[in-house]
Image (spheres, grey):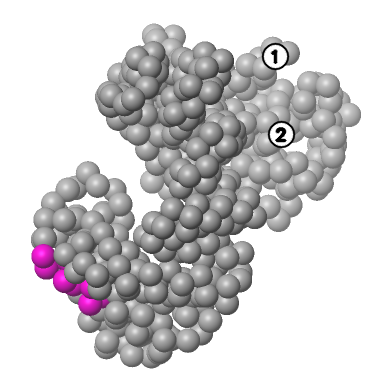
Amino acid sequence: MGNELDGVIVRFPRADGSGVVHELPARICNHCEEPTGKLDLVILEVQELPEHVHPAAICPAERLEIGKGKIHAYIPTRKEDVTVPGLFSDTTNASGLRQITGDAANGYWTEKGSSGSPAFIDGGVQLAGILRLSELGGVHEAFLIPGTVISVFVKAAARDRHLAELSESKGIDPLQLKPLFEAVEREVPAEQFEPAIRAAVDTLLAKSRDKAQPMNDPLAVAEAINAARAKLAELDVEGALNVLQGEVENQESLRQSAAHSEVRLLLEIADIASKAYQWDRAVAALEKAAPLANDDYSIPVMAGDIHVHQGRLGDALAAFERALETAECSGDQRSVSVSQNRIGDVLRAKGNLAGALEAYKKGLVIAERLAISDASNSEWQRDLSVSHNKIGDVLVAQGDTSGALKAYRDSLAIRERLAASDASNSEWQRDLSVSHNKIGDVLVAQGDTSGALKAYRDSLAIRERLAASDASNSEWQRDLSVSHNKIGDVLVAQGDTSGALKAYR
């Protein structure tokens, strides 16, 4: 916001109990403007908090900010802290403020300097609101800006900060980036927002650099796809989708002769829309493409994957069953096996472990047959290892640790061969580390802490190499931390608290 923010200072007069006044620079990150005008509130952001200051969480719901409570105020003219008890109304006025009926002396309601004081419900630790300048001090009445209102602006300030940082790092106009932020914010839990938005930006920018491959369809189709992808370089998702949709509408008039072209455009819409978290738009495009390409196995698979993301497990199961029918009709055995695994995944998520196990075993039979038929086909070998792991996961959930251990070791044997055949293949190396961890988890459940510790350390050795090879890969760095934690847990169980502490650190 420019120079208008320079010189803002936040004072912490008693941050550490020593009497030292901490003064830290801050910036105004939200003026808290509403359609009805500005609130008596601004959101400040300090570069860092004093060591002994801990931020308070904000009440996430109105029911947590009403009832009996207290205001903790520092009165500069008296140089004293006061705690003012009162009753926080269960309604707000036309300005969105919550009225307080106080139990303390009038002076505490009319003293200058109390505005901005925090309010908490009795027994609560979350901020219920912030005191405004009193308008009815003579009758022990005042008003709070509710915590739920403050939370909206705090979240908006955090979003704007992420938006500015990401915009600067990627060289993207914030106005183009904002719609994507809003879409991800609607669809993703708050704790997953930051990695999700970064992944969405990266995948869309990567998409912008790809050129449409020439196919047996009109030149206008490739031109529309390339024009849409060019817009993604500026993260103009809506513009990209509009270009594609415009060409879809053009192709609809030529459906009989251009069915292939229309399907390609619809799949492009589905791909971009899903990457931008516009799930319903992606599904609508896939539903439109399905009757034009009944033999395209990828369409119901993509639809099922999107339904899983949305939590629509019934729709996902129906989509994967259609994919299975398509694969069986085409004779593509690998696709049949993959479809069975996806059906098993959904049944497991729905709590139907017996049904999931049956589906996984059907997939395993096919995966084994394919792997035996061509031992040099690494994709089929990896498929088989995945099938063993999925069966192991269900057996663990059913309490059959012996069966699970056998399944995981069958998977491990395959992954050891793959990893040994190509040490540079990071996916196979990570697969191997995952297998060691799964075996370790089962051994812990069986009480074999020594065996579990060896398995976890085998996994750790792989993850240390991967993490060292690419410090920017957040997934590998997280994998490494998980391995240390698992080792620490086993050492605690063995009574080796010193070793556990080292692992946790």
Asked if the stretch drawn in magenta spans residue 417, the answer is yes
Residue 109 location, quadrant:
top right
Q: Nearest the camera: 77 or 441?
A: 441
Classify 39 as above or below 71. above
Report helix, strand or loop for mark 2.
strand
Q: As rendered, which of 173 and 439 lies closer to the eye?
A: 439
Q: Which residue is mark 2?
A: 146
Q: Is residue 319 visible?
A: yes
| Residue 209 located within the stretch drawn in magenta | no
User: Residue 108's image quarter?
Assistant: top right
Q: Amino acid at mark 2?
A: Pro
- For the image shown, how many numbered marks are present on the structure? 2
Q: Residue 436, position in %: x, y?
A: 27, 74
Q: Position of residue 11 (x, y in %)?
A: 46, 30
Which residue is farthest front? 257
Give me the disc on residue 339.
none
In the rendered image, the vertical position of residue 147 relative to residue 484, given as above or below: above
Q: Nearer the viewer, residue 327 or 229?
A: 327
Q: Position of residue 474 (x, y in %)?
A: 29, 48
Q: Residues within 10 Å of mark 1 (few under 14, many from 20)?
A: few
How far apart marks 2 and 1 lie (CA) works out to: 17 Å
Q: Which numbered disc, 2 or 1, marks the residue that appears first in the sequence?
A: 1
Find disc 1 in the rendering and name its residue: 35
Three-letter code for the amino acid on which mark 1 is drawn: Pro
Secondary structure under the numbered disc 1 in the rendered image: loop
The crowding category of the residue bearing disc 2, from other C-alpha atoms within 10 Å (few below 14, some 14 to 19, many at least 20), is many
Residue occupying the far top of the picture: 3
Q: Which span is picked out in magenta? A: 412-421
Please give left or right for residue 287 compared with residue 122 in the image.
left
